[in-house]
Image (cartoon, rainbow, N blue to C red):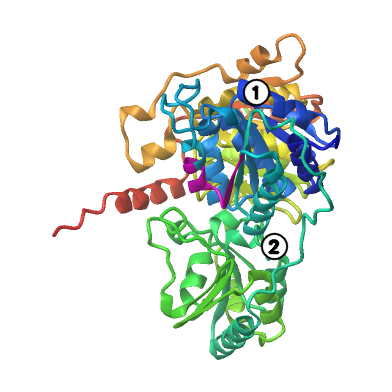
Amino acid sequence: MPDSTVGKYLATRLEQIGLKHYFVVPGDYNLTLLDQLVANRGMEQVGSCNELNAAYAAEGYARVHGCGALVTTFNVGALSALNGVAGAYAERLPVIFISSGPNTNDEGGTHYLHHTLGTHDLSYQHRIIQQVTCAAERVQHAENAPAQIDHAIRTALRERKPASIEIACNLAGVPCPAPGPFDAHPGPATGDALALAAAVERTAAVLGDAKKPLLLAGVHLRPYGAVGAFQELAEALGCAVAVMPSAKGLFPEDHPQYAGIYWGAVSTPGCEPIVDWADVILAAGPVFTDYSTVGWTALPGADRLITAEAGSVRCTDTLYTGVPLAAYLSALAGKVTANSTTLDQYRRMRTQRAEPEVLAAEGADPLTRAELWRQIRQEIDARTTLLVETGDTWMNGMYSHLPDGARFEIEMQWGSIGWALPASFGYAMGLEEGRRLISVIGDGSFQLTAQELANLIRYEREVLVILVNNRGYVVESEIHEGAYNYFKNWDYAGLVTTFNADDGNGLGLTATTADELTSAMSRARDHSGGPVLIEARIEHDDCSAELIEWGAKVAHANARPAHRG
């Protein structure tokens, strides 16, 4: 009898695509599958507190490791994970979403099963999950399992989106053919060679005719492997390079062509004017939403916009399909003529506008947002990842300088509050040795998924969590005020002691003044063997001017009247 089983086949494939960890929540339908998976010693099975957190953790892991995976039980587990999987889809992150299914003998039966809606239809989980995955396989025959597993994983890696594999609970230990070699990183797709050549030729001509060209970096440069090709094009063209907010960190901020974050009225100083001044903008991998365009007020006009996406290029009045993004940018770099007009103008404007220095607060003064972020910025070096949760942390993180080598993580497309803490756990599990993660999370977001702090302690992840306690959903208050934006306060630093119990080594600290924060930061640097949570208490209304302006414009977009007739 062959040693390979359906579960062991899946485990081998996960190991072959480079996973070192995967996230699980046990349930009666998936216990045999977990036994089969844990038999693979090349990966670590990592427990999560619930399925939503496991999905967020797998998404965070995929950000740093290239791909993630989670395992849930049937229905009650899988549907709990759905929000996190949908976020991975929106953010273009390949996550292998594995769930158990009912026994194959129950298909078509006339009895009812637990963890179901009390119907005889047992396929609705599969149909629901299809909406947030690029491939969804339902394994009900062991002989079909290898092909179905391979199809799901290959599609996820190619499309850079989640794929699901539902395995009937009585098949996980059933023999199946052994897995052969598997190329986890196939070469870039060649696409349509004629369309690629035509798109490059046309774009080079448009840029050549432009008097003031500018490049705009979008977040989809990363999932489609085009970050290096974009920098290659930027250096060949020599123009100013602006970065969309969710793409922060994808073009070096110390690069001489860097012109800041383009975010409409809340752009970094000098960036909005230079983008508005450009006569041709090549946006590579952009995602234009109401959030990223500040309520549709920062959307470049189509008459001066070239949009290069994952598989297509729209150049003025022509659409070229089947064009791989990285190949297009790299080929274009060899065709363009240098034009530094926008960069020269940006530098002139910057020399005329001195940015105010953020001075250190007096030590005994109550802690403020400005002082909190001044000290956070001092902690960021080339080996740091700064991860920010939805809210004013977006704004403050966006305007924090990243030295070359530092990274930035934001979930701007999906924007699900509660994402940051379990995503930090997943990210930390995949983080390379010698790198540090700093996560800044608002109190409201933290309350949604706080229990995953216990797993940061359990797995001894040395993450610095800055918990901003400003007594409410400040971002919601700036969009639309209401009593519902306020909730019960917690002793956040005290939770660390609770979660430590008798064997943990987390450290919880509270800062209410500048001196207390300085001391807490120093203790965090010296702490080892577990996470540090610093509860930074600031006033509710102490938010950035950019959040106020952004919130007002988003509120205006939300409140547009309905069309009549």
Q: Which secondary structure, mark 1? A: loop
Residue lying at 80% horizontally and 39% vertically, measured from the top left: 20
42 is within the stretch colored magenta: no
* Residue position for label 2: 225
Q: Amino acid at mark 1?
A: Pro
Give the percent coordinates (x, y) of residue 155: 64, 55
Horizontal relation, residue 1 to residue 286: left or right:
right
Give the percent coordinates (x, y) of residue 221: 63, 62
Residue 102 shows in the view: no
Q: Which numbered marker is on residue 91?
A: none
* Residue position for label 1: 26
Other-residue count near label 1 (Cα within 10 Å), few / some / many at <14 / 14–19 / ≥20:
some
Other-residue count near label 2 (Cα within 10 Å), few / some / many at <14 / 14–19 / ≥20:
some
Range of the magenta residues?
A: 127-139
Q: Which secondary structure, mark 2? A: loop
Quarter of the image where the C terminus is located: bottom left
Quadrant in the rendering for residue 342: bottom right
